[in-house]
Image (spheres, helix red, strand yellow):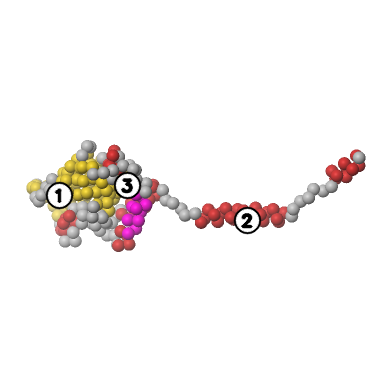
Amino acid sequence: MASSLSLLTSLPKPSFPPSISSNHHRRRISFVRSSLSTQPLVAGPDDLVSTILSKVKGTDRGVLLSKDGHREVSDVAQKLQKYCVSEPVKCPLIFGEWDVLYCSVPTSPGGGYRSSFGRLFLNAKEMVQVVEAPDIVLNKVSFSVLGFLDGEVSLKGKLKVLDEKWIQVIFEPPELKVGSLGFRYGGESEVKLEITYIDEKIRLGLGSKGSLFVFLRRGH
């Protein structure tokens, strides 16, 4: 009996060739790698914000962009829209001072002052929108006339919430200042804007006629 046990314990244990085990392991790693590589990379909101800012900065608020450039900005804005809070008009982040960094229709902010003819004589220096609680909006465009005389156009409006994303602003007649002279002209004006994305850094808006705006919070 002892000899039988001794014989059993002395028998060699079955083993597989090393190549079979290692090849199976390599195939499994390759499969995992290929599965990961086929999954599309989805950019998060921070990456999209950095992307849209890089595309609009230095373009004179969109004037210098080509059609393809405007299309790329629009594509990124649509992706950011997915990350917008559910009721942006109630978000306290809308308040503050904002630089108008881009508009898909460059003549929308500033009107005739931003037309091709207007830009021959007027160099826009700043375009700022201030939103004050609870319902005040101040728009200001500062410029220089022929490079030596400073001027400013400002509008004050009252904000009205239309729904969870849309706002309406009714502006008083604009005030024009050139040098030491200042006067009001024209009549009231009205704009409607959908807030499509907002965070601590940027705000995106879509006008009722389809104009896309990119606002950058001052200080960023």
From the top left corner, tell me how far across and down residue 159 is, in percent. Answer: 20, 42
In whole angstroms, how far apart are the C-alphas of marks 3 and 1? 25 Å
Q: Residue at x 32, y 47 (%)?
A: 197
* Location of residue 115 with respect to 83 vertically, above or below: below
Residue 30 x/y as whole percent = 59, 55
- Residue type highlighted by circle 2: Arg
- In-front residue for pair 131/128: 131
Callout 2 secondary element: helix
**How many labels sit on residues?**
3
User: Magenta segment range?
Assistant: 71-81
- Mark 3 in CB contact with mark 2 (< 8 angstroms): no
Please name the amino acid that badge 1 sits on.
Ser
Q: Picture coordinates of residue 90 (x, y %)?
A: 28, 39
Q: Which residue is mark 1?
A: 189
Circle 3 residue: 197
Residue 169 visible at all: yes
- Labels 3 and 2: the sequence-earlier one: 2
In the displayed structure image, the side of residue 107 where residue 28 appears, left or right: right
Of mark 2 and mark 1, the one earlier in the sequence is 2
Q: Is residue 80 left or right of residue 153?
A: right
Q: Residue furthest front?
A: 163
